[in-house]
């Protein structure tokens, strides 16, 4: 019985770690995507205006700007809960997840703009440190499974190469190049 409880607890923490890492991955990439979208739509002028506006604010008012997306999406979340309450579970869940994802994206974009002001607040710095520690914990917990997935992907690539008869290692080298590009992008 104890083994069952331990496995259930381990599965819970693993799932929580994976969800946290997915959210941090989205956080990291949404900011890049929104900046790229702004450049594509030639909105740099407005982004600069927002940066100039935030520079005039106190740290506490900057916190208000930073968390505003949480309040903006509240009506969408309520619609999602209403859909769930009326038996439309999938539609409601998708509405809530979409609203949360959009808010996460805008918060990551705003964090880039508000970071310096937010870091002036001691409590925010402490919370930021805790979040970074949680990210490190989640990465460490998931790392062995991630390595196992990579090993299985490598084995699958070798089997595909053997099956389709391409040069031994060509597919693996392509996959490794993609991984290296991803690593470089993450470290930049």
Image (tube, rainbow, N blue to C red):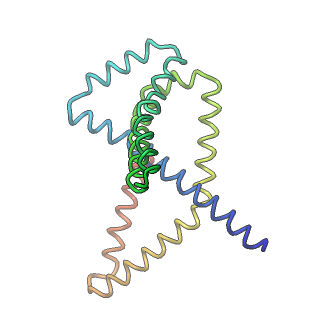
Q: Residue furthest right?
A: 2
Residue at 35% over, 41% down = 32
Q: Is residue 22 above or below residue 115?
A: below
Decide if residue 170 is on the left or right side of residue 77.
Answer: left
Residue 28 at least partly seen: no
* Residue at 41%, 35% in the rendered image: 75
Query: Which residue: 62% across, 34% down?
Result: 127
Toward the left, the furthest residue is 41
Residue 79: x %, y % from top left? 40, 41
Q: Is residue 173 above or below residue 49?
A: below
Quadrant of the image occupied by residue 50 = top left
In-front residue for pair 25/156: 25
- Up the image or down, 62 lies above or below 126; here it is above
Q: Position of residue 72 (x, y in %)?
A: 41, 30
Q: Can you see residue 101?
A: yes
Whether residue 29 is situated above or below residue 173 in the rendered picture: above
Picture quadrant where residue 108 is located: top left
Horizontal side of residue 5 vs 37, given as left or right = right
- Which residue is rendered at x = 60% and y = 28% of the image? 124
């Amino acid at each position: 019985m104890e083994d069952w409880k331990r496995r259930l607890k381990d599965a819970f923490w693993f799932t929580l770690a994976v969800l946290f890492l997915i959210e941090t991955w989205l956080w990291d990439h949404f900011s890049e995507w929104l900046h790229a979208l702004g450049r594509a739509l030639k909105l740099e002028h407005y982004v600069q205006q927002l940066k100039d506006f935030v520079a005039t604010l106190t740290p506490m008012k900057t916190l208000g700007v930073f968390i505003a997306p949480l309040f903006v999406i509240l009506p969408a979340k309520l619609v999602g809960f209403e859909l769930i309450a009326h038996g439309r579970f999938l539609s409601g869940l998708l509405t809530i997840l979409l609203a949360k994802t959009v808010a996460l994206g805008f918060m990551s974009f705003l964090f880039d703009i508000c970071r310096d002001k937010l870091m002036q607040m001691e409590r925010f710095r402490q919370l930021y440190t805790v979040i970074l520690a949680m990210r490190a914990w989640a990465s460490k917990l998931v790392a062995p499974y991630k390595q196992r997935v990579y090993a299985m992907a490598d084995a699958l690539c070798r089997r595909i190469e053997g099956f389709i008869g391409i040069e031994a290692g060509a597919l693996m080298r392509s996959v490794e190049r993609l991984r290296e590009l991803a690593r470089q992008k993450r470290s930049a």
